[in-house]
Image (cartoon, grey):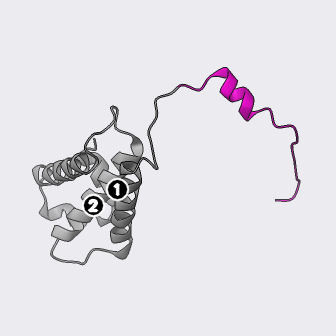
């Protein structure tokens, strides 16, 4: 779903967080978060949607901060994890779906067939 490079890239300037973790440690955290999400949702679409990958990345970063004893988890990282749970709940309740239906020409005609169009030069 996600890889070590994605985690390192997302952590960016806070890379000192990773100094206590080997790549195997990071991969273990990634795997545990992937397993949690798979169990939580019961099933995952294939390919895994970008939104679910982002949630997994946020959960992984939270876990790295949590396991890092030198500093507290930043509020923004905690908020990302909370938002991830909200999104997983919406996916579980089918409020967010990942369809594979193709858009047909008729669908596009409906989108572009508005009878009135409004334009403004004011921004």
Of all residues, the one furthest to the top in this rendering is 105
Residue under label 1, please give it. Answer: 10
Image spot of residue 66 (x, y percent): 20, 70
Q: Main secondary structure of the magenta part?
A: loop
Image spot of residue 7 (x, y percent): 28, 53
Residue under label 2, please give it. Answer: 61
Image spot of residue 100 (x, y percent): 46, 29
State the residue at coordinates (34%, 38%): 48
Residue 72 colored in magenta in the image: no
State the residue at coordinates (88%, 53%): 120
- Residue 5 is left or right of residue 104, and the answer is left
Residue 111 colored in magenta in the image: yes
- Residue 47 is left or right of residue 21, and the answer is right
Quick one: SS at disc 1? helix
Comparing 96 with 47, the one in front is: 96
Name the N-terminal-most of marks 2 and 1.
1
Region of the chain picked out in magenta, as a range: 102-123
**Circle 1 residues within 10 Å: few <14, some 14–19, many ≥20:** some
Comparing 33 with 9, the one in front is: 33
Comparing 56 with 64, the one in front is: 56
Do the residues under discs 2 and 1 have CB atoms within 8 angstroms? yes
- Residue 105 is left or right of residue 82, and the answer is right
**Circle 2 residues within 10 Å: few <14, some 14–19, many ≥20:** many
Quick one: SS at disc 2? helix
């Amino acid at each position: 779903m996600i890889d070590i490079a994605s985690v390192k890239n997302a952590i960016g300037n806070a890379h000192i967080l990773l100094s206590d973790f080997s790549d195997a440690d990071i991969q273990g955290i990634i795997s545990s978060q992937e397993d949690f999400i798979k169990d939580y949702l019961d099933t995952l679409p294939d390919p895994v949607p970008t939104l679910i990958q982002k949630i997994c990345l946020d959960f992984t970063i939270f876990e790295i901060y949590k396991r890092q004893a030198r500093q507290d988890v930043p509020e923004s990282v905690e908020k990302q994890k909370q938002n991830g749970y909200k999104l997983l709940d919406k996916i579980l309740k089918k409020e967010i779906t990942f369809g594979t239906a193709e858009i047909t020409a008729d669908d596009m005609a409906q989108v572009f067939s508005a009878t009135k169009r409004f334009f403004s030069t004011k921004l």
